[in-house]
Image (cartoon, rainbow, N blue to C red):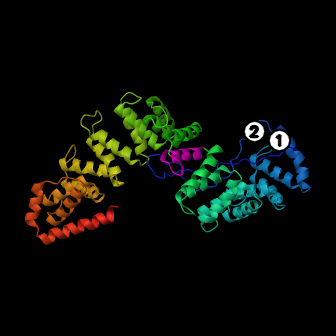
Amino acid sequence: MTRIIPLRASVLCLTAWLGLSPALWAAVPDYFEIAAPKRAEQTPDTTNYALILHDLKSLAESGDAQAQFDVGSLHAQGLGTLQNDTEAVRWLRRAAAQEHVNAMFYLGDLISAGRGAPQNDALARDWWMAAAKQGHAQAQYNIGVGYARGVAVAQDYAKAMEWYVLAGEQGLTSAQYNLGLMYLRGLGTEPNFPEAYKWMLLAAKNGGRMSQNLLGNLYYDGIGVAQDYAEAARWWRLSADQGSPGAQTSLGDSYLMGRGVDHSYDEAVKWFTLAADQGHAKAQFSLGLAHQLGFGLPSDEATAADWYKLAANQGMGRAQQQLGLLYTRHASPLYDAAEGVKWYQMAAEEGAVQAQMALGKIYGQGDGVPRDIEASAQWFTRAAGAGNARAQSNLAIMYVDGLGVAQDYSEAYFWATLATKGGETFPELYWQQMRDNLSKRKRRKAEKKAEKWLAQYRP
């Protein structure tokens, strides 16, 4: 008798970046998700399924648990009959009542998705738990997801790991991947890079594209394994060939820098384009650079700006800064100071120090926009507070001269001290002016303030 295997959806939603340089640490979930089963497309030829369903129903009515499961699966997928989740749940319940492990698991999936029964996370978890206790790997994984995300149970990463281990030891790629992430990030356990590598390697060998991508990152940065650019590129290629935009971008970077592969602008552009067409912001930014600088492509600032905008509109500060630079550069055919300020401001508001510096200079000089010395002081203040020595020096001068801020020699001395400790040369003329207007006690007070600031904001 033909047995019907329920269709399963992908169980991972991969979004956030870890931010470990220089590799692109993409594909780290925000956290693990369960996806409901996909509805199958109605097959053009339902004749055989209809006959199978007819034969199965008599067995199912007589109490055969496997037949009940198969009938429920056919109804859920719309094979041999119109798709009917309510009927699917009815038959799966009958099979699950006889402890049919796949029926319990699939029933949990349908209830979790609100298909054929009211959506109920707690009830879905009960059915998954019943299947998990019988050793069903995907059910064990789903129980782990529940603990990791705190769905229908208190969040508990350690318990999530216990269930992932059970599923991972049975070869379930998604569980192995999540275990690798948890060891990498120290969730439910202390960070353990060799263990992270072990589980990620298992998942990657099983063909998981995101596991292959992350394994490439581990090799690139030498985390949990000896650094090996060639191995990084090899795993990225496997992932990239499966369509992973993060891996495609990393592989493009490898060709751009000639790390682990022969240097090739053409190959770099090819992989960046594949990723950029999927909306990957870093790849879009890299294509912008390729067009702007003319590597692997003709130099074209207008096309570069188009790619930068795609990345910038996803919130990428580097792309916003690059647009600011393009539009405020007088020699650029795109010169438009107001447009440049707009993009610089977007990046600066998110803490991009170079954009804050650029705005301080533009407003201070009135370069293409009305001069606004108060705005200049405000942007230099933000950049100075982020530790930029040049901004600290500029701000000190503004306090001495009372430009955009009230004249304050103590505050000037404080920022000048920080600037010099950061490697900036501060004009002797201004040091003399501050010494002439500050007592030794006030100068020492400003120096102590600077020492305290450095202790607090610098390692």
Crowding around mark 2 (Cα neighbors within 10 Å: few <14, some 14 to 19, many 20+) is: few
Is residue 379 among the parts visible in the rendering? yes
Quadrant where the C terminus is found in the figure: bottom left
The reply to whether the C-beta atoms of the residues labelled 2 and 1 are less than 8 Å apart is yes
Quadrant where the N terminus is found in the figure: top right
Q: Secondary structure at mark 1?
A: helix
Give amino acid for label 2. Thr
Q: Indicate whether 306 appears above or below 39.
A: above
- The residue identified by callout 2 is 43
Using residue 298 as the reference point, say whether residue 91 is left or right of it: right
Q: What residue is shown at x 65% (from left), y 60% (from top)?
A: 144
Residue occupying the far top of the picture: 298
- The residue identified by callout 1 is 49
Q: x, y (%) of residue 85?
A: 75, 53
Q: Indicate whether 115 appears above or below 233.
A: below
Q: Secondary structure at mark 2?
A: loop
Q: Quadrant of residue 379?
A: bottom left
Give amino acid for label 1. Tyr
Q: Is residue 35 magenta?
A: no
